[in-house]
């Protein structure tokens, strides 16, 4: 029993923010007005057409306007009374109390307009309260449900991360800034200095491709993502994502590159510490 009470208490303390923004409030008011009016016109629930019209105001109006009166009252509570009372947001228990207050206020409005003058005031109040509660809860609940669905879909869209461009193309340029090769970063295997050119070895289809680009290794390195492409020798830059093994022979390190099994790359002493730093988790 204590577990159930604790669960209920926890639930009642949860925030209720469906009706915090103006757009949601307007939707609630308009939906209640349209739904209630159509429902009354089509079904005449609880014999509302026989409601008393003895007061001066009721004689000037029709029972068909009950939905409009109800929606206007809800608009008053949401747009006027809530700001006046500084109720910018609710917890669930506060919202339930506020909903009860709105139904009682609706009852008082209908009582003033459509009460039967020959009936005791208290009994007439409870009679109209019963009708008001039954008529208000349905459109109010549906409106809140629809608002909840819309907000949940918006939150889901926001929570879904943007697709990661794992195959984001590298634009590899020559010394004049002209793009000579565009390929996915993870397809580049290594870059080798060859005189005044850089030889880019990359995986293309089912074979290794090679592209010569006229530029220096230093300038070429500035075009590459530093977290992935590491210089390991005065002549080589390797893609860490494609390093399949690191072999230690005495004081030397040799790298094996994916798709280049016959081409071990030696890590020179100058770049060894930087390489090991990037390889450590």
Image: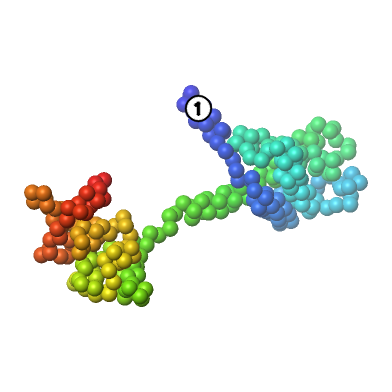
In-image side of 111 versus 3 (left or right): right
| Picture colour scheme | rainbow
What residue would you read off at disc 1? 6
Residue toward you, 189 or 52: 189
Count of numbered circles in the view: 1
Identity of the residue furthest to the right in this view = 56
Give the answer, above or below, for where 95 lies relative to 140: above
In-image side of 51 versus 205 (left or right): right
Residue toward you, 117 or 78: 78
Horizontal and vertical percent position of residue 118: 88, 37
Could you say whether the residue bearing mark 1 is in a helix, strand or loop?
Answer: helix
For the point 33% across and 63% down, the residue is: 222
Horizontal and vertical percent position of residue 13: 56, 33
Horizontal and vertical percent position of residue 281: 26, 46
- Quarter-wise, where is residue 183 in the image? bottom left
Q: Is residue 137 visible?
A: yes
For the point 83% across and 44% down, the residue is: 114
Mark 1 neighbour class, 10 Å CA radius: few under 14, some 14 to 19, many 20 or more:
few
């Amino acid at each position: 029993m204590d577990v159930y009470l604790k669960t209920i208490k926890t639930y009642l303390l949860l925030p209720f923010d469906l009706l915090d923004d103006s757009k949601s409030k307007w939707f609630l008011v308009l939906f209640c007005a349209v739904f209630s009016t159509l429902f009354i016109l089509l079904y005449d629930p609880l014999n509302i057409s026989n409601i008393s019209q003895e007061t001066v105001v009721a004689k000037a109006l029709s029972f068909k306007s009950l939905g409009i009166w109800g929606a206007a009252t809800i608009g008053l509570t949401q747009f006027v009374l809530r700001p006046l009372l500084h109720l910018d947001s609710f917890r669930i228990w506060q919202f339930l109390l506020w909903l009860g207050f709105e139904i009682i206020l609706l009852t008082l409005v209908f009582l003033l307009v459509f009460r039967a003058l020959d009936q005791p005031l208290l009994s007439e109040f409870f009679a109209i309260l019963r009708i008001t509660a039954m008529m208000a809860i349905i459109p109010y609940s549906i409106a809140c449900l629809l608002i909840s669905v819309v907000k949940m879909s918006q939150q889901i869209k926001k929570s879904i991360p943007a697709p990661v461009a794992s195959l984001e193309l590298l634009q590899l340029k020559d010394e004049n800034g002209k793009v000579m090769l565009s390929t996915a970063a993870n397809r580049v295997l290594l870059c080798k200095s060859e005189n005044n050119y850089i030889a880019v070895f990359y995986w293309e289809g089912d074979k290794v491709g090679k592209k010569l680009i006229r530029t220096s290794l230093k300038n070429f390195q500035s075009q590459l993502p530093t977290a992935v492409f590491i210089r390991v020798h005065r002549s080589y830059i390797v893609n860490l994502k494609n390093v399949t093994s690191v072999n230690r022979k005495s004081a030397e390190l040799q790298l094996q590159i994916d798709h280049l099994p016959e081409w071990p790359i030696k890590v020179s002493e100058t770049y060894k510490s930087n390489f090991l730093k990037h390889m450590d988790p």
